[in-house]
Amino acid sequence: AEEEVISRCTNVSCPARLRESLLHFASRRAMDIEGLGEALVDQLLAKGMVEDFASLYHLEPSALAALDRMAEKSASNLLEQIDKSRKADLARVINALGIRFVGEKTAELLADAYPRMEDLMEAGEEELQRVREVGPRVAAAIRQFFQQPRNRQVIDRLREARVLMEHAPRARPDTGAVLA
């Protein structure tokens, strides 16, 4: 196997990565913020209205309504969608963070193993590898992500914006029993 020699920005607020981070954060499989598409993200970035995805929770209705092809009604609808996303399960939040190698399924497994964001943030690589589907490479990527001070600040800002950082155990559809 060839060694990977690509330099990567692991800071979620890195300008080169911010646009994609915001689009992923808002996507249906992450925080599911309907109406936050490419054109709107581009405008928010061009006008300096967002510096990370936590900024979405601090957007002002009047500033949004002033954007191209946005009226009060569409601004209001978007703010409702953003507000609704505060209640997303921890698995969606983990997926939305865009941690390298962590997709939807791994995010669910991590949320099952660590029902509070704080627990996941403090977990060591060996401990993380006890989670099904988390090997050394994934565990290292998770640790690297949470060791970045800027990423921790964004998570703090999400918490301050009242984004839910806890996981409700999933019930099995056939029996109602809680999945461990």
Image (cartoon, helix red, strand yellow):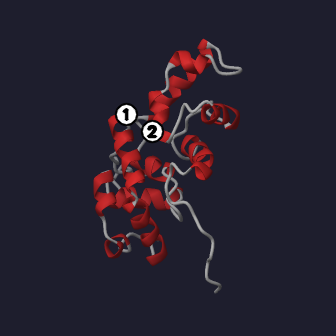
- Residue 149, percent across and down? 37, 55
Left or right: 65 as drawn, with respect to 175: right
Q: Which of 150 and 69 is in front in this view?
A: 150
Q: In this view, does 141 lie above or below 38?
A: below
The local crowd at label 1, few if under 14, some if 14 to 19, many if 20 or more residues have their Cα within 10 Å, is some
Q: In this view, does 174 lie above or below 58?
A: below
Q: Name the residue carrying label 2.
A: 54
- Residue 79, percent across and down? 51, 24
Q: Residue at x 55, y 31 (%)?
A: 49
Q: Is mark 2 on a helix, strand or loop?
A: helix
- Residue 148, percent across and down? 40, 59
- Whether residue 56 appears in this view of the structure is yes
Circle nearer the N terminus (2, 1): 2
- Residue 30, percent across and down? 53, 46
Which of the image's four quarters has the N terminus? bottom right
Residue type beneath disc 2: Ala
Q: What element carries label 1?
A: loop
Asked whether the residues under the numbered discs 2 and 1 touch, taking CB atoms below 8 Å apart as contact, a structural biologist would say: yes
Q: Name the residue carrying label 1.
A: 161
Q: Which residue is drawn at 37% across and 47% down?
A: 153
Total numbered badges shown on the rendered structure: 2
Marks 2/1: CA distance?
A: 7 Å
